[in-house]
């Protein structure tokens, strides 16, 4: 069994135990599957491998846990989608993913417990939506593409940023952070473009 | 993790952003009835939560655009507040966190 790690159109050599399966101009980076327990360490090890690959090539990271029988099965899985994957690769070329999360400073739960009227509840939630937009819109304008993720908290979003513009993006983030002290915000990265692997033809 | 932080919170406290690893690593088939029940509850509650969020956003837009009486706004707010409370109760009952009800909807995520 082999695990698929990433898809790239870079034909460069890989260090064992990584192997490249070529298919329709693409290269699927595979590793022997490990059937150990999933824990934080295992996830970070996998992440480190993909990030090393990303240092000198553009790639689409494959969803964690994608395991197939053999190299033939890996090629068969990629072949029917090779054109869409090539387009997705073009979209992320030269860029990395940065993640931004924001929660209410002091915690959401403390805030939620304080509502007395239905009107207050709605007003607080409307204010939270406005805050999310106030953070997201300028950041999205500084990025090549962006995705809003669902979930608790005020904002969780991913931004596709040109490698050369990461510093500028972080500087803008810090500026917004200082403007919105009512929020606790964090910006992480650079990540492989997990949120921009296709599915959208924008 | 720390070396992935490009810009952290001003007070340096990353705890609000921590996610228990348990919820990443346990989504596999397990014939134990209790975890099956929990898995099913997680799926159902995820859908309910998604609908709740959609309806809430729609309600916020209606409030913003005016046209609702004070009484209607109050009733709407109380309904969502109650729904929120009930969801929290159900999550607790099944040992789920708000994070667990976070479905990766891919491109659909953009609609929200």
Image (cartoon, rainbow, N blue to C red):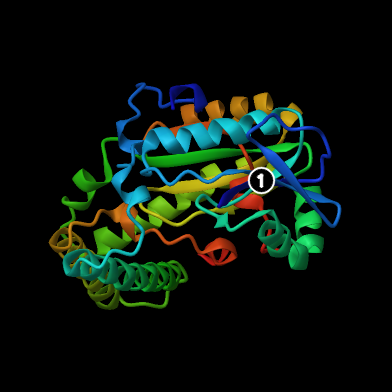
Q: Point out residue A165 in the picture as x, y percentages from the top left corner.
A: 72, 29
Say which quarter of the image contains residue A12: top right
Q: How many marks?
A: 1
Closer to the camera in the image, A111 or A145: A145
Q: Where A173 falls versus A35 (above or below)?
A: above
Closer to the camera in the image, B57 or A94: A94
Instruction: Using the rendered image of the protein, determine whether residue A48 is visible from the camera's viewpoint.
Output: yes
**Circle 1 residues within 10 Å: few <14, some 14–19, many ≥20:** many
Instruction: Using the rendered image of the protein, determine whether residue A183 is visible from the camera's viewpoint.
Output: no
Instruction: Name the residue rendered at 36%, 77% in the picture.
Output: B68
Instruction: Name the residue rendered at 44%, 23% in the picture.
Output: B2
Instruction: Name the residue rendered at 31%, 36% in the picture.
Output: B16
SS under mark 1 = strand
Q: Point out residue B45 in the picture as x, y percentages from the top left corner.
A: 29, 69
Q: Where A168 falls versus A144 (above or below)?
A: above
Q: Point out residue A120 in the picture as x, y percentages from the top left corner.
A: 25, 58
Residue assigned mark 1: A6
Chain containing mark 1: A
Instruction: Name the residue rendered at 37%, 49% in the picture.
Output: B24
Q: Where A78 falls versus A187 (above or below)?
A: below
Q: Point out residue A45 in the picture as x, y percentages from the top left corner.
A: 49, 32
On the rendered structure, is A130 left or right of B89? right
- Judged from this view, the residue extending furthest toward the right is A25
Say which quarter of the image contains residue B40: bottom left
Closer to the camera in the image, A16 or B105: A16
On the rendered structure, is A97 left or right of B103? right
Image quadrant where one finds the C terminus of chain A: bottom right
């Amino acid at each position: 069994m082999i695990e698929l790690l990433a898809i790239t159109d870079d034909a460069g050599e890989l260090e064992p135990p990584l192997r490249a399966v070529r298919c329709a101009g693409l290269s699927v980076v595979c590793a022997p599957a490990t059937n150990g327990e999933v824990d934080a360490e295992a996830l970070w090890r996998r992440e480190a491998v993909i990030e090393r690959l990303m240092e000198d090539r553009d790639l689409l990271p494959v969803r964690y846990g994608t395991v197939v029988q053999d190299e033939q099965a890996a090629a068969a899985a990629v072949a029917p989608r090779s054109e869409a994957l090539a387009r997705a690769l073009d979209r992320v070329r030269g860029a990395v993913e940065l993640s931004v999360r924001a929660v209410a400073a002091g915690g959401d739960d403390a805030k939620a417990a304080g509502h007395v009227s239905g009107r207050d509840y709605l007003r607080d939630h409307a204010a939270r939506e406005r805050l999310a937009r106030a953070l997201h819109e300028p950041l999205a304008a500084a990025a090549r593409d962006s995705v809003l993720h669902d979930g608790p908290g005020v904002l969780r979003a991913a931004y596709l940023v040109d490698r050369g513009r990461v510093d500028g993006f972080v500087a803008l983030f810090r500026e917004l952070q200082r403007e919105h002290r009512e929020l606790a915000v964090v910006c992480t990265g650079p990540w492989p473009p997990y949120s921009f692997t296709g599915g959208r033809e924008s | 993790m720390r070396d992935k932080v490009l810009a952290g919170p001003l007070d340096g406290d990353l705890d609000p952003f921590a996610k228990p690893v348990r919820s990443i690593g346990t989504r596999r088939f397990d014939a134990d009835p209790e975890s099956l029940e929990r898995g099913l509850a997680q799926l159902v509650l995820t859908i309910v939560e998604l609908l709740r969020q959609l309806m809430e956003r729609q309600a916020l837009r209606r409030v913003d655009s005016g046209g609702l009486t004070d009484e209607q706004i109050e009733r709407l707010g109380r309904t969502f507040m109650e729904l929120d409370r009930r969801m929290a109760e159900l999550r607790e009952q099944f040992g789920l966190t708000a994070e667990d009800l976070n479905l990766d909807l891919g491109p659909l995520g953009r609609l929200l």
